[in-house]
Amino acid sequence: MNARADLLALDADTLAALANRGLVKRAARELDSGAGASVSLDAAGEVTAAFPDGSRAALPAGVPLEAGTCSCPAPGVCRHLVGLVLAYQAQARSQARSRSASASEPESAPTSGPAAGPGAKAPVPPPEPELPWSPAEFDDAALLAAFGRPALAAARRAWERGVRVTVQRMDAAHPAPSVELPSCTVRFPVPRSLNFALSGATAARHGELVTLAVWAFRAADEDGTPSGSARTAGGPKRADAGTAAADRAQPAPATATATATATATAAVAALTEELLRTGTARTGPVLLAQLARVEAELAAVSAHWPAAAAAELRVQLAAYADRDTRHDPDRVAELLVELRARLRAADRALALGTGESAVTQLRRTRLVALGCRVSAGRGGAERCTELYLAQPDAGIALVLRKRWAVPEGRPGTGAELAGRRLLGHSVRALAGSNLVSESVSRSAGRAVTVERGRIASTSVTPLGDAWASLPAPLLLHDAAARLRALGGRPPRPVRPRIEAENAHVLAVAEVGPLGYDPARQRLEAVLRDAAGTEVRLSAEHDVLCPGRIDALAAALESGTVTHVSGLLRPEAGRPVLDPLAVRTAAGPVHPDLAAETDPHPFTALPPAAADPLAAALTAARTALAELARTGLDAALPHQLAPAAAALRRTGLRTAAALLDALAADPSPDRWTDAALHLLTALDLHREEARP
């Protein structure tokens, strides 16, 4: 019987993902101490292990690790099954050394020295150097045998709606092929094995998600889609591509879903048209109830992105009715544009979010805190903490959000919230920690929740050096390269609504001098990353976080900064980082949670240069927002004339012509044309235009 190549390919990280890191460490210690198992391999490929404590474990060929058997009472993947894999790998190392020694010495020469023990640290030699391979090699018969008919039927239903995927093929920088799905990232760390594919999801959805990942590879290979490119796979036109086994398992007609989606999107179109005609200032309880009903209809057909936009619009309109300071007329206009633009988009799965699971329950998951952001809500009666968390296995960032009521007369600053309890720990402790949890759920928009009543299944340990070991693109050594990779994204109004999409950790090689802009109350500094790219750090003062600027300045001037976490964005063609936390020799610093101290002395920055293009675009956007507030039915042609003239003076003739067309015909479609053009132009100008 040939060696079990699948077991030899399992590394410590993959074993930890299949079991947990504590079990892997314990099994490795037992092996090193001589208390490991004696293993044997039979002709059928089954590995059996006998342990000194009397336990016996077995792992047949062609089954996942959790399908192995053990005589101990522990449920699931126990330390003995992990120990079986480690002992088998150690035996393979010993045998490989023996063969190597025999081949290098004369036959008559006696061997000397004891054989290496089972805990020896020499690397496991792979059976053969692995050539690049693709999970598209798995056919539907293999998927059906591995996961069963229900999993393939569920995958087929998602595939018919269309799924947003990013396929990463195997190469020197990515030894394991992977697919980023909306609900998780699926990796194939063991070549040509479905049994050890990793999804991070619970067993109930694991087979469905791995199947979708295989189909995504199949479609990408057929189309020649480059690695790392986001695309919509599946959809009604491609529902039959490589899914014959799913058809046989349980055909899922898409007619009812398509009809419900069409009904919901038609309701969005009608409601936004009514809001634009009558004006958002005249919104009453009836329209708010209609908006809530449309939001529920969109969520029911998995149109998560317009559902989220409708929810935010409802909050904005309610804030206007309550005279709440959270109301922002420009944001209302942006949300109306977004809702109408998503209905126009050619890529429906991208624009609507169909095919995404609303919530995915994850199995035992390790999360690394990246910092905390504090904001206000409900007219000052609430505070919101947003904990940014990296999921190293998936290479993405998530957000854990918590809202707190602020008693009357209390300031509710970040320093006060730092001591509040969340998951049994203070917010400050969670913001600088590693979390390992069995009760994490992830939404389609990458928001995290922890189920109540299962807090004991979440462990919290200090952050340590976890940032330094984060995978790319969470950890950035070249911020400019990351921005180039994001350059081909669709416009913001039709982009997926992803939380923490731009959250990263920047490895800092050098910190430049600090400066303060008193007009905008903004601290700025120049950071240099390992590639030599200059990254502008920019942090604004916030009355809710009175210690933010001073704590950030003290950390940057400590001379021991190694990493800065934050939200990365392009501005004027350069990378800009809005900081969340700073890693120094003394530990992490969380500016939003810092207490107020004596003001730090700063060098004043010169005032920003005037930008006539941005000023003209902003003025035009404000004019459109005012039209949305008062209503197009009451619009007068001369209201848009000054904004159109300013656009024409700066050379933006197309934008000016769109405003002229709206003045001549104040209809919702004309308003959407002009607003979509202006918002996209303003975004691109801010991101790319050099000063």
Image (cartoon, rainbow, N blue to C red):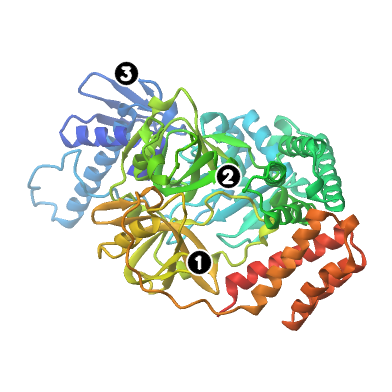
- Residue found 54% across the figure and 74% down from its top: 573
Q: Secondary structure at mark 3?
A: loop
Residue identified by numbered label 2: 138
Residue identified by numbered label 3: 72
Separation of marks 1 and 2 at Cα, in angstroms: 57 Å
**Callouts 1 and 3 close, C-beta under 8 Å:** no
Q: Secondary structure at mark 1?
A: loop
| Amino acid bearing label 2 | Phe
| Amino acid bearing label 3 | Cys
Residue 300 in which image quadrant? top right
- Foreground pick, 374 / 252: 374
- Closer to viewer: mark 2 or mark 3: 3
The x and y percentages for residue 209 are 58, 39
The x and y percentages for residue 671 are 83, 61
Looking at the figure, which quarter contains the C terminus?
bottom right
Taking the image as drawn, is residue 567 in sight? yes
**Callouts 1 and 2 close, C-beta under 8 Å:** no
Residue identified by numbered label 1: 520
Going from N to C along the chain, the mark reached first, 2 or 3, is: 3
Categorize mark 3 by other alpha carbons within 10 Å: few (<14), some (14-19), many (20+). some
Residue 51 lies left or right of residue 142; in this view the side is left
Whether residue 617 is situated above or below residue 397 in the rendered picture:
below
Categorize mark 1 by other alpha carbons within 10 Å: few (<14), some (14-19), many (20+). few
Residue 138 in which image quadrant? top right
